[in-house]
Image (cartoon, rainbow, N blue to C red):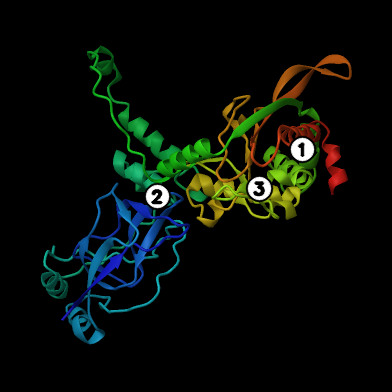
């Protein structure tokens, strides 16, 4: 007789207490293999597939899409049996994969990377309510193997957007690398679909406004809200800023990129300046202990930077940034930025930062007073680099100018230290040759 096994939501790491169901990948009555992903969930850090350690017939699912499930709560129940039991009967009935009871540790919980043919989906068996009926249905019902259609899309959020908007991903041509389907491709398809009879729409009477809607805080948005709220409540933050002439920095970048080899981004140069500045002002590479009784001075610089991804604003972390050259910083920043856009950052790549660099100039703005990334003690903000009138060499000239802002935890240092850090950064932006003295 089959044995029913209950699979509970495991601890996905980083002290997370729950996860939101994004998409069920199996149906009740479906035959699954050991370690086959059964559900896609969104934690406060990433979207992950959760594999089930049991092979057998799915008899129940717990939680609807959009519902949050606590760690340790049931996810699915599976009717399993020994190879001599239901497995042999399934094989006799024409089922390709026998149902076997296997107890073993779960495979890794990396961020979703769907690979064509990675898991086998078996056609649904007869719907089952009681457990015994589910196992019996799995034995006698014909099972049809469905050949997977490989769609060039990585991000689960892109797939979900397409599903919600009724867009057939197999009909799209991706604009990403190797034909990868991006969110913009789906949005273009939605816009094209929505472009109905324009003339009829032009004469249609105005539609009255409906009631206000409440958007629940879930997943990443909820985690961001809680973290920023805590930062604002607990950290006595102060901000100072200064305008800097970045003309020489931009000239240096052009000179570096004229040579063979990987291109150097402005962000990489700013990251290098930050690591040098933190070596001179180590008080700012720190955090206050949970109970507020001490200050932790971090020996390594794990540099976080703000990046816009499929799931909103995230802060990937460049580990041991102080040990990397400018070129190496550029390569790692580029890799993490690409992973952020694809929604494939891992938990380890999103945690453990000690200092954050925020280049909000990419949004076309000059200044900001950002909230610190708790529990970090400091953040450097960089505005857009734009041509402005500037006094240079005693004469008025057009120069490439940026505004630098610096927010810091006033518990770890006084204004003199923060001002000294910001002035040193500004001097390196204006005279990047100063960096040679630190190498």
Q: Earlier in the sequence, mark 3 or mark 1?
A: 1
Q: Is residue 325 left or right of residue 375?
A: right
**Is label 1 in a helix, a strand or a loop?**
helix
Cα distance in 3D space between marks 2 and 1: 36 Å
Q: Earlier in the sequence, mark 2 or mark 1?
A: 2
The residue nearer to you, when weighing 394 against 343, is: 394
| Residue 373 position within the rendered picture, expressed as x and y whole percent measured from the top left | 56, 42
How packed is label 3: few (under 14 Cα within 10 Å), some, or many (20 or more)? Answer: many
The correct choice, above or below, for 369 with respect to 259 in the image is above
The correct choice, above or below, for 146 with respect to 316 in the image is below
| Residue 18 position within the rendered picture, expressed as x and y whole percent measured from the top left | 36, 54
The correct choice, above or below, for 270 with respect to 368 in the image is below
Mark number for residue 286?
3
The mark lying in front, picked from 2 and 3, is 3
How packed is label 2: few (under 14 Cα within 10 Å), some, or many (20 or more)? Answer: many
Cα distance in 3D space between marks 3 and 1: 30 Å
**Is label 2 in a helix, a strand or a loop?**
helix
Question: Residue drawn at (86%, 44%), measured in percent from left and top?
Answer: 436
How packed is label 1: few (under 14 Cα within 10 Å), some, or many (20 or more)? Answer: some
Quarter of the image where one finds residue 90 = bottom left
Question: Residue drawn at (25%, 77%), measured in percent from left and top?
Answer: 99
Residue named by callout 2: 156
Residue named by callout 1: 253
Q: Earlier in the sequence, mark 2 or mark 3?
A: 2
Q: Is residue 117 left or right of residue 146?
A: right
């Amino acid at each position: 007789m089959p044995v029913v096994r209950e699979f509970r939501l495991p601890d996905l790491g980083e002290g997370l207490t729950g996860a939101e169901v994004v998409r069920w990948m199996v149906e009740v009555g479906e035959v699954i293999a050991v370690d086959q992903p059964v559900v896609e969930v969104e934690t406060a850090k990433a979207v992950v597939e959760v594999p089930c350690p049991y092979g057998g017939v799915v008899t129940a699912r717990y939680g609807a899409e959009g519902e949050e499930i606590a760690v340790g709560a049931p996810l699915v129940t599976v009717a399993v049996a020994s190879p001599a039991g239901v497995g042999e009967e399934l094989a006799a009935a024409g089922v390709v994969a026998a149902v076997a009871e296997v107890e073993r540790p779960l495979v890794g919980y990396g961020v979703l990377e769907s690979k064509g043919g990675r898991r086998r989906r078996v056609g649904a068996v007869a719907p089952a309510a009681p457990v015994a009926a589910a196992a019996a249905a799995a034995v006698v019902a014909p099972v049809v193997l469905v050949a997977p259609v490989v769609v060039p899309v990585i991000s689960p959020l892109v797939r979900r957007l397409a599903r919600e908007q009724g867009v057939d991903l197999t009909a799209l041509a991706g604009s990403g690398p190797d034909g990868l389907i991006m969110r913009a491709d789906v949005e273009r398809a939605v816009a094209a679909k929505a472009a109905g009879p324009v003339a009829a729409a032009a004469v249609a009477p105005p539609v009255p406004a409906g009631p206000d809607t409440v958007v629940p805080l879930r997943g990443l948005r909820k985690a961001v809200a809680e973290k920023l709220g805590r930062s604002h409540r607990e950290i006595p933050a102060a901000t100072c800023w200064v305008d800097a002439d970045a003309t020489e920095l931009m000239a240096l970048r052009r000179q570096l990129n004229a040579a063979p080899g990987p291109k150097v981004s402005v962000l990489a140069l700013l990251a290098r300046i930050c690591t040098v500045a933190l070596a001179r002002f180590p008080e700012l590479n720190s955090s206050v202990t949970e109970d507020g009784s001490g200050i932790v001075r971090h020996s390594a610089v794990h540099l976080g930077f703000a990046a816009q991804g499929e799931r909103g604003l995230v802060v990937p972390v460049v580990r041991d940034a102080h040990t990397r050259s400018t070129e190496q910083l550029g390569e790692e920043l580029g890799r993490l930025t690409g992973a952020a856009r694809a929604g494939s950052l891992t938990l380890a790549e999103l945690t453990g930062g000690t200092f954050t660099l925020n280049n909000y100039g990419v949004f076309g703005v000059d200044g900001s007073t950002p909230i610190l990334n708790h529990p970090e003690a400091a953040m450097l903000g960089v505005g857009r680099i734009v041509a402005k009138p500037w006094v240079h060499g005693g004469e008025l000239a057009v120069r490439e100018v940026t505004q630098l802002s610096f927010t810091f935890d006033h518990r770890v240092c006084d204004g003199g230290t923060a001002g000294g850090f910001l002035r040193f950064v500004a001097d390196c932006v204006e005279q990047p040759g100063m960096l040679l003295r630190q190498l």
